[in-house]
């Protein structure tokens, strides 16, 4: 396991990020808005792979050194619960989030947004079915999505419960969660 390093936050004074290799695992900072006599420093172990949601550790302290000591205690308890798969998942999620924000900054829709907008604009047939080819063509040729981007968007829309794919693979329907997006 890589060593822990502490780096100052360039955007905020009195704030440090603790890293384990390339992963930020804690923030130690003075909290604003607290009464003067309250403990001002907060430490939060914030390494959240999907399998560890709810296991966050943290607390308040009177000094930076106490907050750092609180982190070290919490990290010793938390780290043994982490697997290499958790670190891989964290990195994957971090990369996906960076890509999502880059797409937004460039003014580009995410593949799921285009896919759902195309499906919503397509006239459904019997029993609210939308033929898959009515989505395939516009996504690949009008929107210019690569087959991998299209598949990733399609798989995500199904995984999030927005679309339901028939076992034949020839049509989709809006699931209730997907219909709510356009209600």
Image (cartoon, grey):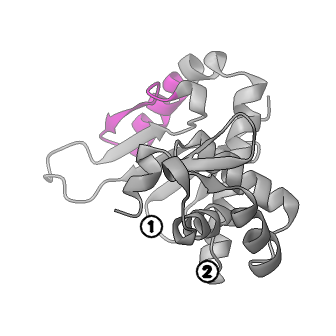
Q: Where is mark 1, residue-wise?
A: 13
Q: Which mark is residue 118?
A: none
Identify the residue shown where x is 46% and y is 68%. Answer: 12
Q: Where is mark 2, residue-wise?
A: 105
- Looking at this rendering, what residue extends furthest in the bottom direction? 107
Q: State the SS at label 2.
A: helix
- Looking at this rendering, what residue extends furthest in the right direction? 147
Identify the residue shown where x is 70% and y is 65%. Answer: 134
Distance Cα–Cα, label 1 vs label 2: 27 Å
Asked whether residue 109 is in view, the answer is yes
The picture places residue 72, in percent across and down from the top left corner, at: 54, 28
The picture places residue 49, in percent across and down from the top left corner, at: 61, 34
- The image quarter in which residue 33 lies: bottom left
Identify the residue shown where x is 63% and y is 58%. Answer: 97
Q: Is residue 59 left or right of residue 112?
A: left
1 or 2: tag closer to the N-terminus:
1
Q: Is residue 146 left or right of residue 174?
A: right
Residue 16 in the image: above or below residue 142: above
- The image quarter in which residue 78 lies: top right
Structural crowding at the residue carrying mark 2, measured as other residues with C-alpha within 10 Å and reported as few (<14), some (14–19) or many (≥20):
few
Residue 115 in the image: above or below residue 143: above
Q: Nearer the viewer, residue 113 or 104?
A: 113
The picture places residue 176, in percent across and down from the top left corner, at: 41, 45
Say whether marks 1 and 2 touch (CB < 8 Å): no
Residue 90 on the magenta span? no
What are the residue bounds of the magenta stretch? 53-74
Identify the residue shown where x is 76% and y is 27%. Answer: 85
The picture places residue 18, in percent across and down from the top left corner, at: 60, 45
Residue 26 in the image: above or below residue 55: below
**The N terminus - image quarter:** top right
- Looking at this rendering, what residue extends furthest in the front direction? 126
């Amino acid at each position: 396991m890589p060593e822990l390093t502490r780096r100052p936050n360039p955007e905020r004074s009195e704030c440090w990020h603790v890293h384990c290799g390339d992963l930020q695992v804690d923030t130690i900072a003075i909290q604003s808005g607290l009464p003067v006599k309250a403990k001002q420093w907060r430490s939060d172990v914030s390494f959240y792979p999907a399998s560890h949601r709810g296991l966050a550790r943290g607390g308040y302290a009177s000094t930076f050194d106490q907050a750092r000591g609180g982190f070290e205690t919490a990290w010793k308890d938390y780290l043994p619960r982490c697997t290499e798969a958790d670190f891989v998942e964290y990195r994957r999620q971090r990369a996906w989030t960076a890509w999502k924000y880059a797409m937004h900054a460039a003014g580009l829709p995410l593949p799921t947004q285009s896919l759902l907008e195309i499906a919503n604009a397509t006239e459904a047939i019997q029993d609210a079915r939308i033929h898959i080819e009515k989505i395939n063509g516009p996504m690949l040729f009008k929107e210019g999505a690569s087959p991998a981007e299209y598949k990733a968007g399609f798989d995500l829309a199904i995984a999030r419960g927005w679309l339901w794919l028939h076992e034949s693979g020839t049509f989709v329907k809006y699931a209730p969660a997907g219909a709510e997006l356009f209600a």
